[in-house]
Image: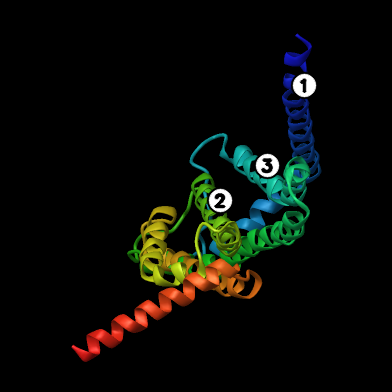
Amino acid sequence: MSQHTDQEQPLIAHLVELRQRLLYSVLAILVIFLCLFYFANDLYTWLSAPLTALLPEGTSMIATDVTSPFFAPFKLTLVFSAFLTMPFLLHQAWSFIAPGLYTHEKRLAIPLLLSSILLFYLGIAFAYFVVFPLIFGFFTSVGPENIAVMTDISSYLNFVLKLFFAFGVVFEIPVATLLLLWSGIVTVESLKSKRHYVIVACFVLGMLLTPPDIISQSLLAIPMWLLFEVGILMGRILIKPKPDEELDQELDEAIDEEQENRNSNS
């Protein structure tokens, strides 16, 4: 009976700690939300600036639902609070898993954690300052002359939040690439040999994660490919191959060279 209790106790302790950290995370989002809710309308004005600056004179955004003027800024403030507390949320996740890591894993995990936070914010900034002006400028200029552009505030919010999340996740590609290389699942050479498949996959994901237009798809797919190349470059610099991997790589190169010589002689 006591042995069974001893086996269950660590699991119960982990569940209690997980519940506590989830509670801290929710409270952190709630505190930021309460501080920002007074400025909800100002936040929405800031978010809609890339579109409203391009609307024809005499037009504005509209609310087709009675509750939209309240719930659209409310939703934006809640999501914005989650974005602002992302460092704290990742810190809570890190504190939960850190005791199970080795020392050398912790030394690598901390820079990756900080990099992932920075890259997520860079992805959002890239979407707001680079992508939005381009795609909104395109959308507002291609319509018929007798059609007034008057976007619904809820539709606009859903659109930009989708792009924010997509670009924030996409900018994590270098971190994901480094993790794959660090774990030994793939090597730098294997990733380089599959580059053409990755490029195709980037444009497919760009098609699935963005609105159905070639501009926004390309603005997501091209950074994905470039970030993949950055991940490969950082992996080559930071992650040194093990002796066995170096030997296998030399053998593969020797076999390829021998095969090429045979083909040239024949």
Look at mark 2 in the image and give the residue it sits on.
Answer: 161
Q: Is residue 264 above or below residue 168?
A: below
Label 1 and label 3: CA atoms lie apart by 36 Å
Along the line of sight, the residue nearer the viewer: 26 or 259? 259
**Element type at mark 1:** helix
Instruction: Answer with left or right where residue 116 lies relative to residue 87.
Output: left
Q: Amino acid at mark 1?
A: Gln
Label 1 and label 2: CA atoms lie apart by 42 Å
Q: Position of residue 30 (x, y in %)?
A: 76, 37
At 76% across and 54% down in the image, what residue appears? 106
At 48% across and 41% down in the image, what residue appears? 64
Q: Earlier in the sequence, mark 1 or mark 3?
A: 1
Instruction: Answer with left or right where residue 73 lies relative to residue 28.
Output: left
Q: Dot 2: within a 10 Å radius of its alpha carbon, few (fewer than 14), some, or many (20 or more) residues?
A: some
Q: Amino acid at mark 3?
A: Leu
Q: Position of residue 253 (x, y in %)?
A: 42, 79
Look at mark 1 in the image and give the residue it sits on.
Answer: 9
